[in-house]
Amino acid sequence: MVNAMKSDKRTAILQAAKQLLLEVGYESMSPRMVLDRSNAGQGSFYHHFAGKKHLAKTVLEEIANEMIADLSSTFENDRLTPLEKLDHYLAKPRNGQQGCKLGRLANEKAFDDDELRQPLRRYFSFVLALVNKELEQAVEQGLMPADTPVDALAHLLVSAVQGGYVLSKSLADKASVNVATSGARTLLKAYQTDASQKAAIT
């Protein structure tokens, strides 16, 4: 029973920190805010976490794992072609004013710290690797031209999502991110059309 209560307190602290990171960011989040939100005592906080940085890194690792699992569910669907997987990734409806759970933190000064930045690096490295892989397979399958700049295009597609979030926040328009990803989808289709035309010529 005691262990269960300790686990419940840890879960409550993590959940409160996750909400606050999304609402106010890392630099504005304080241990007191976490305690107030979670109804946990200071003793419980420091029993489970060495401090604010340790708590935040734990939460960010959880968020990264959740986002990676969500992304993997699309890219592991063998019934889709490489380009269909990429189109599904880009076509996912997004609320731009909520922002990316991880990307929105990247500009905070605190994330110059290698340890705090590690979950962000891990997630975005994973996304880029996935997109690169699908583009490479599309080229191998003749769905895109052989001279497709795969790495540059992968960075552009991921940036369309993240840059779209920035536009949405700046313009106070939650749909801007979806306009940006729609443009990226159009670009992918143009590459696909180009590949088809080249195949027809040869």
Image (tube, rainbow, N blue to C red):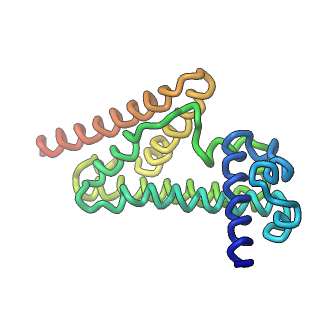
Q: Is residue 118 left or right of residue 40?
A: left
Comparing 107 with 24, the one in front is 24
Q: Residue furthest front?
A: 1
- Give the number of marks: 0
Question: As rendered, which of 38 and 28 lies closer to the eye?
Answer: 38
Q: Nearer the viewer, residue 191 or 76?
A: 76
- 108 shown above or below 15: above
At which x and y percent is residue 113?
Answer: 79, 56
Instruction: Give left or right: position of 83 versus 62.
Output: left
Q: At x 74% / y 57%, what residue is drawn?
A: 56
Q: Indicate the quadrant where residue 178 lies.
A: top left
Q: Quadrant of the N terminus?
A: bottom right
Residue 68 horizontal side relative to residue 136, left or right: right
Q: Measuring 47% from the left and 59% from the top, which residue is drawn there?
A: 129
- Residue 105, horizontal then vertical, whole percent: 69, 45
Q: In the rendered view, tell whether residue 11 sits above or below residue 178.
A: below
Left or right: residue 170 compared with residue 54: left
Compared with 112, 69 (above or below) is below
Q: Quadrant of residue 182 in the image?
A: top left
Hey, which quadrant is residue 15 in on the image? bottom right
Q: Position of residue 180 (x, y in %)?
A: 46, 30
Percent coordinates x, y for residue 124 in the rendering = 56, 54
Residue drawn at 43 percent across, 35 percent down: 181
* Residue under the image location 40 percent in, 35 percent down: 184
